[in-house]
Amino acid sequence: MYDLIVVGSGPAGASAARKAAHNGLKTLLIEKERIPRNKLCGGGVTPKVLKLFDFKLPDELVECAPRSARIHGGENCYRFQTDRTIVYMTSRSRFDAFLTERAIDAGAELKDGSPVYRIERTNACVEAKTHSGSFRSKMLIGADGMGGPTASNGQLHDHWMPDEVVYAMESEAYVGEGAVEDFVGEEGFFDIYFGVSPAGYGWVFPKDNHLTVGVGCRLSRLRDARALFDGFVKKIPQLEGYEIPRPMAHLIPLGGATKVPLLTDRILLAGDCAGFAEPLLGEGIYFSILGAQISAEVAAEACRSERFDAEFLRTYQCRCRSEFGLDFEVAFRAAGLTYLGQYDMKRVAQFFFGEKKVQECIVGLMDGSLRYRDARTKLAWPYFKYRLSKLGMPVYSWSAHTLKALVRLF
């Protein structure tokens, strides 16, 4: 019998397996597909993700390393540039395979090509059943995504509400290395588009010889998915004349809106099936890995203490709440103000994306030097000007002294 079974070898599952093996647990990592496998995702790895690793991300996995961003809001484009990489563009199939290899290096055992169809708990163990055999362990971490069996079989969560998830569509436009270089430019750009979805946004991420093109929409607001994607593509002049393959689709949890129980006796959830996707910038990889590492540490503590009951495991939920729960709530409120609510996106873009302080906040959130809970004070001034503008007040014509006096009144 194993100490720990991890279901799913994405960033969350592979990271949990590596951390658990490092902590001395006999660990089995089960993946339904053969590694490497395709995975629909933008593939953006932020600098703060690398801070979670005790190893270096190989240069050959990085297909592009933008230093700047273009944020589109309505007819306007707001550019901000830095002197350092703000996101590492990767292929998720290769990135996930690399993380799985690191888990194996740490001592975890891999069983790929083995879909788990049933998970059962007893007083003595938890059992994962696959078509190639059943496996037992003291603990199980479910990192098997929104459609995996762990949450439902563990009687934690069996369905998602339409307002809790984003329906994301994505395609790879193979435009060639020259076109990618032209798109990125000397400044090293990637693009985010607001105002192109009823409750979501679009993106264009540069890779080695292609562009990853995608758009998402809160499922409760989605009407015609293909029309939404095709309409977004037509707004991007760099894609004119290129054949865009039929998009693939998947669901992403909307962190802050999603309230998923994270644990029960002998079982912990991590990654997407736990709702660990930040709702404003769409950062999922970082929080999936961070939550997974915490889950592995709690599993190791449980095995040492021989305590597998939900009361003992509740420390996992407390630690996740402390690490990023508040940040998800702040990010969700910010998302509601902007793309989720579509509150006058032209005005939002003017007072937020064009502000130097906001741009600095975005970079800080991506490189880990700033958390959402700390960004609230930095964003208060742009938000105040936005609210004044909505009241019809000509903010930019006022003196700084007048504006500061008004701020003190609120």
Image: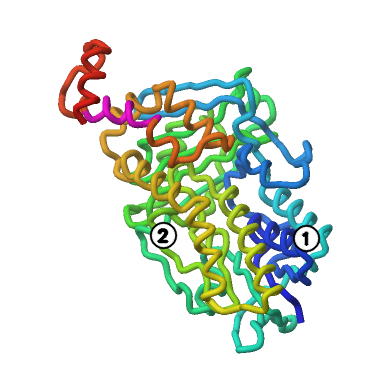
* Residue type, numbered disc 2: Thr
From the top left corner, tell me how far across and down residue 91 is, in percent: 68, 45
- Label 1 packing within 10 angstroms: few (<14), some (14-19), many (20+): some
> Among all residues in the image, which is located at the extreme bottom?
123
- Mark 1 residue element: helix
* Residue type, numbered disc 1: His
Number of numbered discs overlaid on the protein picture: 2
Q: In which quarter of the image is residue 335?
A: top left
Task: Work out how far the residue at label 1 is from the one at label 2, CA to CA, in angstroms.
Answer: 31 Å
**Residue for point 38% across, 56% down:** 257
Query: Which is nearer the eye, 315 or 261?
Result: 315
- Left or right: 184 with respect to 18? left
- Quadrant in the picture for the N terminus: bottom right
From the top left corner, tell me how far across and down residue 125 is, in percent: 66, 84
Residue 178: in magenta span: no
**Residue for point 59% across, 35% down:** 367
Pointer 1 or 2: first along the chain = 1
- Quadrant in the picture for the C terminus: top left
Tag nearer the camera, 1 or 2: 1
Q: Main secondary structure of the magenta part?
A: helix
Residue topped by disc 1 = 22
Query: Which is nearer the eye, 385 or 351?
Result: 385
From the top left corner, tell me how far across and down residue 310 is, in percent: 53, 76
Is 345 located above or below residue 156 in the figure?
above
**Residue for point 40% across, 53% down:** 256
Is 301 located above or below residue 327 in the figure?
below
- Label 2 packing within 10 angstroms: few (<14), some (14-19), many (20+): some
Specify start and end residues of the magenta stretch as a single range. 378-387
Residue topped by disc 2 = 258
> Among all residues in the image, which is located at the extreme front?
305
From the top left corner, tell me how far across and down residue 29 is, in percent: 73, 68
